[in-house]
Image (cartoon, grey):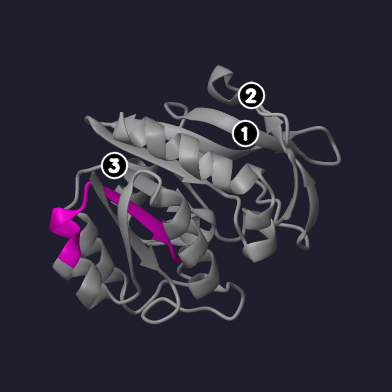
């Protein structure tokens, strides 16, 4: 049975926009389909448990500027080379640490990436691995203009008003280390849609091989 560690925002990494405790609890329930899942929300607890994790999921973000704890978070994460699942606002983490983007295969770029107001969102599958998905409508934030490595495999996109496709989920492998990202999952309503939890399941299965 896999040991899954979920690092949640809410304590050391908190912001006024995301109900981290609520969404991390939902994510942990989905991940328990693959093994034992534990949620932590402090860097102390993350550091204490990360070495024993078979999968690390991050549901936390850095806000609109570098976070005072970024150096410590980067120090902890560099110890971990196992499968990594990053969710939603985790794309904003560690803006001054290029290693995070290289590990994840993309990121939120401040003053470039944005999202419209949360609302109805039509998602489109662009990879054979998710071509069978039928429930592609949700209510969420449409992350737009994320920077994604050309080496990543994009799975889901949304199209803006000009018909430009913007990645929402991808997988990435760098130096033998697997990572996956989903921009979906702003709140409990987003996870009430079949799409967000199903993408977590599929990314997790890919990560665990």
Q: Earlier in the sequence, mark 1 or mark 2?
A: 2
Q: Earlier in the sequence, mark 3 or mark 2?
A: 3
User: Which disc number belongs to residue 83?
Assistant: 3
Q: Disc 1 versus disc 3: distance between alpha carbons?
A: 20 Å
Magenta extent: 49-60
Query: Which residue is pictured at 64% across the width and 22% down the height?
Result: 132
Q: Circle 2 sits in a helix, a strand or a loop, which is it?
A: loop
Q: Circle 1 sits in a helix, a strand or a loop, which is it?
A: strand
Check disc 1 and report the residue beneath it. 156
Mark 3 nearby-residue class (10 Å; few <14, some 14–19, many ≥20)? many
- Can you say whether 15 is above or below 82 in the image? below
Which of the image's four quarters has the C terminus?
Answer: top left
**Residue 52: x, y in percent?**
14, 55
User: Which disc number belongs to residue 53?
Assistant: none
Which of the image's four quarters has the N terminus?
Answer: top left
- Can you say whether 172 is above or below 22 in the image? above
- Can you say whether 117 is above or below 87 in the image? below
Query: Pointers 1 and 2 in contact (CB under 8 A)?
Result: yes
Q: Earlier in the sequence, mark 1 or mark 3?
A: 3
Is 77 colored magenta in this rendering?
A: no
**Residue 162: x, y in percent?**
85, 36
- Can you say whether 26 is above or below 55 in the image? below
Q: Circle 3 sits in a helix, a strand or a loop, which is it?
A: loop
Residue 164 left/right relative to 55: right
Q: Disc 3 versus disc 2: distance between alpha carbons?
A: 23 Å
Query: Which residue is pictured at 21% across the width and 53% down the height?
Result: 53
Tell which of 37 and 125 is nearer to you: 37
Is 55 colored magenta in this rendering?
A: yes
Residue 77 left/right relative to 193: left
Query: Pointers 1 and 3 in contact (CB under 8 A)?
Result: no
Q: Disc 1 versus disc 2: distance between alpha carbons?
A: 6 Å
């Amino acid at each position: 049975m896999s040991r899954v560690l979920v690092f949640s925002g809410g304590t050391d990494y908190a912001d006024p926009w995301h109900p981290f405790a609520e969404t991390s609890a939902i994510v942990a329930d989905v991940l328990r389909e693959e093994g034992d899942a534990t949620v932590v929300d402090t860097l102390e607890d993350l550091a204490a448990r990360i070495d024993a994790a078979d999968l690390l999921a991050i549901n936390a973000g850095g806000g609109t500027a570098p976070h005072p704890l970024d150096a410590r978070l980067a120090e902890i994460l560099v110890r971990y080379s196992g499968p990594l699942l990053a969710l939603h606002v985790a794309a904003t983490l560690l803006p001054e640490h290029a290693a995070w983007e290289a590990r994840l295969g993309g990121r939120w770029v401040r003053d470039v990436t944005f999202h419209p107001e949360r609302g109805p969102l039509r998602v489109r599958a662009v990879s054979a691995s998710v071509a069978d998905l039928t429930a592609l409508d949700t209510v969420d934030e449409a992350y737009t203009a994320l920077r994604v490595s050309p080496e990543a495999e994009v799975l889901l996109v949304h199209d803006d008003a000009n018909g430009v496709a913007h990645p929402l989920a991808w997988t990435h492998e760098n130096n033998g280390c697997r990572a996956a990202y989903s921009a979906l999952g702003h709140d409990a309503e987003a996870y009430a849609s079949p799409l967000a939890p199903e993408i977590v399941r599929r990314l997790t299965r890919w990560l665990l091989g």
